[in-house]
Amino acid sequence: MKNVMLGLGLIVALSAFHMIKETAFVWTKTMHDYGQIKQGTPVSASFEFLNEGDEPLMILSAKASCGCTVADYTKGEIQPGKKGTVRTTYNAAKVGSFQKSVTIQPSVGDPIKLIIKGEVI
């Protein structure tokens, strides 16, 4: 019985280690502050990531928190050691401070929230 429990424990530990290796999106930043921007002038920011894992990764979706923000991202598999980007564009139509998010759904792991903020003048 002890050997069975030890074997199961080893399998669980190795599975957890394998899962950690797979979730290897390493972001250079997850927030961008535009500062003050001019009304009526759309602005963009790029968020770069590196696949530091041993397996290919993919972005399945990028969903903006509102219609004033659009996101585009690297499509297809990002191989180990390779980089990808998410580019956000904010339509600065309304005067005032703003903070918006883009939720990234990766092929493995939890969603990642990218934040853009600033003030439209």
Image (spheres, grey):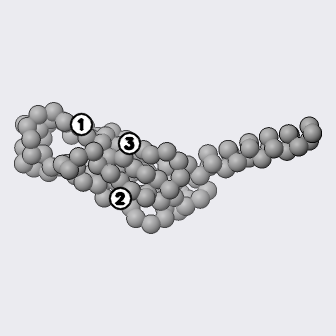
In the figure, is residue 36 to the left or right of 17?
Answer: left
Res 83 quadrant in image: bottom left
Q: Position of residue 46 (x, y in %)?
A: 31, 51
Q: Position of residue 59 (x, y in %)?
A: 43, 57
Q: How many marks?
A: 3
Please state which amino acid type lies under the numbered disc 2.
Tyr
**Residue farthest toward the top in the current orientation of the protein:** 97
**Residue farthest toward the bottom in the current orientation of the protein:** 76
> Does residue 93 appear anywhere in the picture?
yes
- Report if the CB atoms under discs 1 and 2 are less than 8 Å apart: no
- For marks 3 and 2, the one nearer the N-term is 2
Q: How crowded is mark 2: few (under 14 residues within 10 Å), some or many (20 or more)?
A: some
> Does residue 44 appear anywhere in the picture?
no
Q: Nearer the viewer, mark 3 or mark 2?
A: 3
Please state which amino acid type lies under the numbered disc 3.
Lys
Q: Name the residue under label 3.
A: 113
Q: Where is residue 8 in the image (x, y as percent from the top left)?
A: 81, 44
| 82 or 115: nearer the viewer | 115
Q: Residue at x 27, y 45 (%)?
A: 65
Q: What element carries label 3?
A: strand
Please state which amino acid type lies under the numbered disc 1.
Gln
Q: Mark 1 points at which residue?
A: 99
Q: Is mark 2 on a helix, strand or loop?
A: strand
